[in-house]
Image (cartoon, helix red, strand yellow):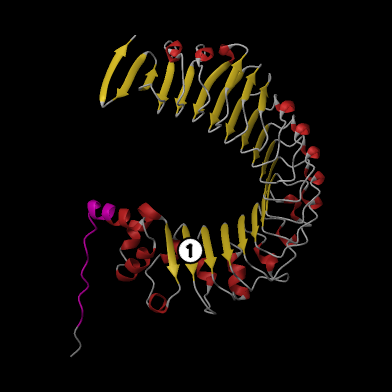
Amino acid sequence: MKVRRRKVKLPPLHDAVIRNIVSYLTGCNRTLVNLMCLCRRFYQIRDIFLGQIVLYHTGREVSRKKPDGWNRVHSMEVWTGGSKKRNFKEMSRIHILTVSGFKHIGPRSLTALGRIHTLRINYCHSINNYNISVLGLVHTLHLHACPNFTDVSALGTVHTLELTSCRVSNLSGLGSVHDLTLNLCPAVSDVSALRTVHTLCLQLCQSITDVSPLAGVHNLSFYDCYYIRDVSPLEAVHTLKIHNCRRVTDVSALKKVHKLFLHDLRVDDVSTLGSVHFLEISNCEGLEEVFVLEGMHKLVLTYCDYLTHVRVFGRLDSLDITSCRKLREVSLLDGRIINSLSLNYCDKITDVSGFANIPNIKLSGCKNLTNFLSLINVPNLRATFCKGIPDITKNKGCVTLFQDAATYQDAE
């Protein structure tokens, strides 16, 4: 006699249970895999709270029947090892997919991946010059350590493209890419095809020496490109970031750049950059003096160990100085020309009486301040970790002092 098993309808999970499970799962997505194998109803929780999943291609998890809706998540990461294969056609509805460790992906699966909005492929040997064109319809594509292709001209229709540790040499056809990142691509030397890219980031591309074709790029970044010397053709770039390009020593031609970031350079003269709208300088060896002229909106100075003077001759909205240990003076033509001043861990700054007309001041870690009482009428003032001065916060006339756990307020 055949015994029928009666299906028991389980009640919906209580809200408190759902919250506890979700808060636990967000710490480690691998737990999500184990739970999904045990309870199909968990996908109700996922649809409400998480919208993402991580799959590890191990024998136990793959052998089990997948719960309904597993391939309708917003974001998924799939990992495997060795030569295991997987059919990616069932994942074509996922919005963001990361595929790692699949050395071999079949043609049909690769075509299915070409229909995903955001795709990241890591350590895949199947992609080559003949089949890479199927990924041309992806909106955002990241290829990391895929060594078997050199020609990416077929990816010119991709909106956002990132290539890392790839043997790319021919960049023709990528001029229509909106946002392009090349990281650790040592074979790239000619960037003339990228003159029409909107946003371009070059990292550890050691064969690039001539950047003049990039004068028309809107947002341009260089990171650790050690053989770039002359950046004068880039004077019309809107946003320019130069980080740890040690052979760049002359930046005088960049006075028309709208937003300029100079990090870890051997630059000792920025006198011509006084009118740059936004200027950020960090850890530039030999820089002793900075001038601010009319037209600059914000100036950020960090870890400039040789900087001794900042002279402000034009109206400035924000001045932020951090860990410039030898900075002795911030001289202002008129204190009212600065709207906001932040001084952090500048040990040599002593006299702050010239800042009395600045409406917003933040002081932190300045150990040798004098004349602090001259700032008593500043509308918005905050001082912390300044030797000999109690921590103070003043906001719209309300003063709060913190010293030895005693707190009191005194309204003006």
Q: Mark 1 packing: few (<14 Cα in 10 Å), some, or many (20+)?
A: some
Which secondary structure type mostly characterizes the magenta part of the structure?
loop
- Quadrant housing the C terminus: top left
Query: In the visual, does 377 lie left or right of 260?
Result: left
At x 38% / y 56%, what residue is drawn? 47
Specify the amino acid type for callout 1: Glu
Q: Position of residue 203 (x, y in %)?
A: 67, 52
At x 54% / y 13%, what residue is drawn? 354
Q: Position of residue 387 (x, y in %)?
A: 40, 25
Between 357 and 171, which is closer to the camera in this rendering? Answer: 357
- Quadrant housing the N terminus: bottom left
**Compared to 360, does 246 lie above or below?**
below
At x 67% / y 60%, what residue is drawn? 136
Q: Residue furthest bottom?
A: 1
Range of the magenta residues?
4-20
Whether residue 92 is visible: no
**Compared to 6, does 397 lie above or below?**
above
Residue hosting label 1: 77
Between 134 and 206, which is closer to the camera in this rendering? Answer: 206
Secondary structure type for disc 1: strand
Q: Position of residue 236 (x, y in %)?
A: 76, 34
Whether residue 66 is visible: yes
